[in-house]
Amino acid sequence: NELQDKFSKAQERINQWTVENSTHQEYMSVFESENNSLKELINKTTEEKDEILDEYNQLKEEYEANLERLQESESISLLLIDKETEIDNLNEANNKLQQIVDQLQVSNDWATTRADEEMSKARREVSVQEAEILTLQQTVEDLQGNQQVLE
């Protein structure tokens, strides 16, 4: 009867750790999913930034080509002012976009670090629980062997 109690308690602990192990694995999946989503967001933002930079460079090239034509025309000063304003606006927009990308990178770095820490913690807990489950399974097998000997 005492062996049956020990066996029941050990089986109960195995079941509890199996549930906890499953929960930790679910947490790891959620963290990995969130980490991947953040990486996708950074990649998308970087692509958008690159597209804006390409557009900026194209506009800059157009500006430079127009500037050459303007230097040959009589209305150089008015057109130059307009183009310089466009470049200033583009530079300002580019700076704002760079700030947004930098902020997203910082957020992604923090989230990635946090997710990596949580995943490492969960993996350690899973490893500990798996070792304890193996120990308990061995104990249960020993108890069953003892029970058979007693019978």
Image (spheres, grey):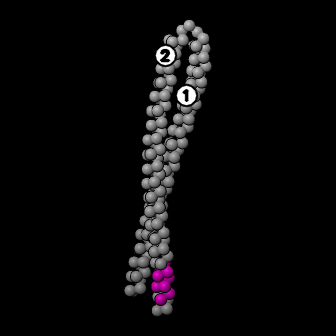
User: In front: 29, or 76?
Assistant: 76
Which residue sits furthest front? 71
Does residue 114 sit above or below 95 in this rendering? below
Which residue sits furthest top? 74
Main SS type for the magenta part?
A: helix
How far across and down, in percent of the image, does residue 64 sit? 58, 21
Which residue lies under the disc numbered 1?
56
Membership of 151 in magenta stretch: no
User: Who's the residue at 49% across and 28% down the image?
Assistant: 91
Which residue lies under the disc numbered 2?
81
How far across and down, in percent of the image, does residue 130 sit? 48, 71
Instruction: Report helix, strand or loop for mark 1.
Output: helix
- Could you tell me how far apart the alpha carbons at marks 1 and 2 are, in whole angstroms? 18 Å
Q: Are marks 1 and 2 in contact (CB under 8 Å)?
A: no
User: Who's the residue at 43% across and 81% down the image?
Assistant: 7
Task: Rate crowding at label 1 as few (under 14), some (14 to 19) or many (20 or more) other CA atoms within 10 Å.
Answer: some
Mark nearer the viewer, 1 or 2? 2
User: In front: 140, or 75?
Assistant: 75
User: Who's the residue at 47% across and 24% down the image?
Assistant: 89
Q: Amino acid at mark 2?
A: Ile
